[in-house]
Amino acid sequence: MSPVVERPPARGGRTVVLGTVSSDAHTWNLVYLQLLLEEAGHRVINLGACVPAELFATACRTHRPDLAVVSSVNGHGCTDGKRLAAVLRADPELAGLPLVIGGKLGVDGKLGPAQVAELFAAGYTAVFHDGADRDRFLEYLGRAELTTTGRPG
């Protein structure tokens, strides 16, 4: 068996840690996002489904990504995402890491302004709730502030 070889991102690409919240067992969204990000020239470390917050934090410390992406489609992303953000933001090495969340974040689909504000207050730098288009997400990845605030440590 050959060892896994991680390739660096393409020129201008980012290193992204990707995963779901601990309660979300869905993987199709992660496969889609991984392919989307890789096709756009980014290197993706896909942690898979049902990722405990501590494992997410360990992966971010280990891989030193430019961005952490949380995807959830089970409707509990807002609630569980706040807990995940609390763990990441409590770690001094990860306090400045750009952190985004997207998908079906509430059980009824759309989030209200108060719920979106709660996610920002928890430490997310962007929120892409159900129905957000992929072009907005890819545009976000290209922003200069990720260059200056990414890669903790």
Image (cartoon, helix red, strand yellow):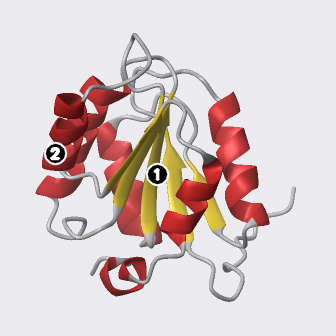
In the displayed structure, does residue 153 sit left or right of residue 22? Answer: left
Residue at 54 percent of width and 75 percent of height = 142
Dot 1: few (<14), some (14–19), or many (≥20) neighbours within 10 Å?
Answer: many
**Residue 95: x percent and y percent?**
19, 65
Q: Quadrant of the N terminus?
A: bottom right
Front residue of this view, candidates 109 and 7? 109
Question: Would you place residue 53 above or below residue 67 in this image?
Answer: above
Tag 1 or tag 2, which sits nearer the N-term? 1
Q: Can residue 4 be seen in this view?
A: no
Q: Name the residue under label 2.
A: 122
User: Is any part of residue 30 visible from this angle?
Assistant: yes
Q: Is residue 138 left or right of residue 144?
A: right
Residues at marks 2 and 1, CA–CA distance in whole angstroms: 15 Å
**Image quarter (top left, top right, bottom left or bottom right) of the C terminus:** bottom left
Local secondary structure at mark 1? strand
Q: Nearer the viewer, residue 47 or 24?
A: 24
Q: Name the residue under label 1.
A: 69
- Give x and y (percent) for residue 136: 55, 56
Q: Residue lying furthest front in this view?
A: 113
Question: Disc 1 residue type?
Answer: Val
Residue 97 percent across, percent down from the top left: 30, 67
Total count of labels: 2
Which residue type does callout 2 highlight?
Ala
Residue 68 in which image quadrant: bottom left
Q: Quadrant of residue 119?
A: top left
Q: Residue furthest top?
A: 108
Extreme-right residue of the structure: 1
Of the pair 15 and 12, the residue shown nearer to us: 12
Q: In this view, does 22 lie to the left or right of 120?
A: right
